[in-house]
Amino acid sequence: MKQGDRLPLDQLPEVARRVRLDVLDMTYRAQSGHPGGSFSATEALVTLYFRHLRVDPARPQWEDRDRFVLSKGHCSPAMYAILAARGFFPRSELVGFRRLGHMLQGHVDLKVPGVDFSAGSLGQGLSFANGVALGLRMAGKDARVYCMMGDGEQQEGQVWEAAMTAAHHKLDTVCAILDYNKVSQTGFVNDNKKLEPLADKWRAFGWHVVVVDGHDVKALDKAFEEAHTVKGMPTIVISDTKKGGGVSFMALKSDYHGRALTDDEMKRAHAELGVPDWQPPAKGGA
Amino acid sequence: MGGAPTAPSQAKDGLPVRDGYGKGLVALGKANPKVVALDADLQDSTRAQWFQKEFPARFVQMGIAEQDMMGTAAGLASTGLIPYASSFAIFTERGFEQVRNTIARTNANVKLAGSHGGIQIGEDGSSAQCIEDIAIYRALPNMAVLVPGDAREAEAMVQALAAHQGPSYMRLTRNKVPFVHPEGMAWKLGQVETLKDGNDVAILACGPLLHEALQAHEALAREGLNARVLNVSTIKPLDAAAVVQAAKACGAVVTAEDHNVMGGLGSAVSEVLGEQHPVPIERVGVRDTFGESGTPAQLYEKYGLTARHVAEAARKAIARKGKR
C-alpha cells in the first residue's frame, strides 16, 4: 500500500469498533455465525486492510495485488465488514449474510469480491497461500501473500506440512498471522490439545516469529513492517488476542464461538461499543 | 513426440500407462509455459520426474505431504498457472477433503494424476491397491474423471486436459499394458470410442481392462458372438447418449474396470441405463473386497478381471436378454 493511501494509525480503533458493530449486526440478523473469532481477528484485519495490503477495490482481480487468505474462514463476518468498508462491495450486502440467494456465504467464498480463497475447512489456507506465493514468484511478481490462521487449526497436521513447505522454498513473501485467541468451539485450545511452546515450534520449523499484542494496532503495524524486511524465510505474526475481545463479557468464552447474541447480550455489547440505545432491527431488512 | 530423455526405450507392444503421463507432460511443458508440476516424493514412479528434469523451475517438490500438495496446487492455479499434481492413486486420497473443498468446490484448474491405480500394482499389496478412487472423485461436482486405456491414450489425454478449464483426476496404472491405440492418437474429453463393432453385446471398458475386453471380443467372435467394444476413458462427464445408443443397439451390456464394482464405471453406466434404457448389465470389477500381494496376472485371475471373465460376463448378459 502506498504511504498516502494508509489510514493513520490513530483512526484504526474507530474502524475496529465499527467492524465489531457490523459483526454483531450480521450474526444477529442471520441468527448464526461466529462473532468470537471475528472479534479477536478484528485489529489484525483492520491493520492489514487499512495499512498494508496492496489491493484495489475497483480491481479485485488485479494480478499484482497482495493476496489475503483467511484460513479461519468462519470469521467471515469481520472480513466481510472490512471488505465493505474498503469499498469492495456495497455495505447493503452485509444484511444478506448467510441468507439464501445472497452473496455473503457463511464461510469466506470466492464469490465475494476481494476474497482470494474459499475457506471453511480448517488447516488448509497456508498450503494455498504457499501455492500463490510460488506462482507469483514464477511470474516474477513481488506481491505478498498474507494468511490468517486460528490457534485451533494449529492442531491440524496440514498446517505443519505447509509450514515446512514455506520454509523449504524460502517463501519470504508469505506472512502468516496466527490469531492466538486461546479458545476454540469447546473450550481452551491448550486444554483440548496443547499447542505450547507455539512460538518455539514455528521457529523450529524455519520461520521468523514476531509475537505481538493482537489488539494493539501499533504493535501489529510494526510487526507487519518487520515482516516486510525479512528475507529468505517466511514470517509469522503470533497475534496474542482474546476470543470475543472488545466486549468484556464475551472475552475468552467459547460460548460465543458460533452463535448470535441474545437481545439482552446485544444491548450490553452495544453499550460497551458506544451505542447505548440498541434496538432489534426490523425483520426482513434486505 | 520427442523430449523424454530418461524414458525407457519404446516397447513395441505396450508400456506402463504412467509412461504416457510423463511423456505427455514433457511435450505439454514445451508447448505451454503455464504448465507446472507437483509431486509428493514419488516423481520417479509417477514419471513426473521426466518433466522435473526438463523444467526444474516449474516443478514443485512437496515432500510426502499430499494434503499440502492439494492446497499448494490450488494456490498455483489461482495465479493462472496450470498445475499437474501427481502421486499414487491411493495417496491422492490422503488429500481427498482438500481436493473436495479447495479444488473441486472452487472449480480450480488443477489436474490430478493418481498413478499405480487398481490391483494391477500387484506385489505392493492391498494398502496400495486403490480400487475406490474413481468412485470418490466421481462424486465431486466439477471434477472430470479419466482412465486412459494405454500409455498412448494417457499421453494424448494429459496434453488435451490443459485446454479443459477445471479440475480433473486422471487414473494411471503402474505395469505394462499392451497398446490398444495407434501412436499420436487424438483425444477429446467426454468422447466414447468404438474399438470393435458388434450387436450382440456392448462391452464398455476402461484402463487395463480395455485390452482384456478386446481379447474377450476375439474369444466371443470364435463362438459367433459379435461384441461391440467401447473405450469409456472419460468416466465423468459420461457420454450418456453413447452409452444408451450402445445398449439400444446390443440389448445387453458388460462393464469392465480394475476398480470396485461399486461406484466406478459399472455404476456410472448402470445409473444411465437404469434411468434411460434398462437392459441386462453385468459388471466386471473387484467384488467389494480388498486385494493382496501377487503378480498382476495372478491378481487379475483371482479377482476376476481377465478376458475370460469379461467373455463370461458377456455370455451371461446375452443369455439374460428378453428374460425379464
Image (cartoon, rainbow, N blue to C red):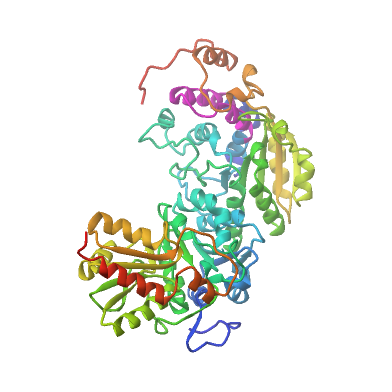
Identify the magenta region: A16-44
Q: Is A44 situated left or right of B89 in this image?
A: right
In front of the other: B187 or B303: B303
**Residue appearing at x 52%, y 76% in the figure:** B297
Compared to residue B316, the image places residue B270 above or below, namely: above
Compared to residue A105, the image places residue B314 above or below, namely: below
- Please say whether residue B22 is visible from this viewpoint: no
In front of the other: B220 or B37: B220
Residue A185 painted magenta: no
Image position, residue B120 (x, y; %): 52, 71
Residue A37 painted magenta: yes
Q: Is A271 situated left or right of B169 in this image?
A: right
**Residue appearing at x 32%, y 56% in the figure:** B271
Secondary structure character of the magenta stretch overall: helix
Image position, residue A282 (x, y; %): 38, 17
**Residue appearing at x 32%, y 59% in the figure:** B270
Q: Is A186 situated left or right of B266 in this image?
A: right
Q: How many marks?
A: 0
Image position, residue A256 (x, y; %): 58, 24
Q: Residue furthest bottom?
A: B12
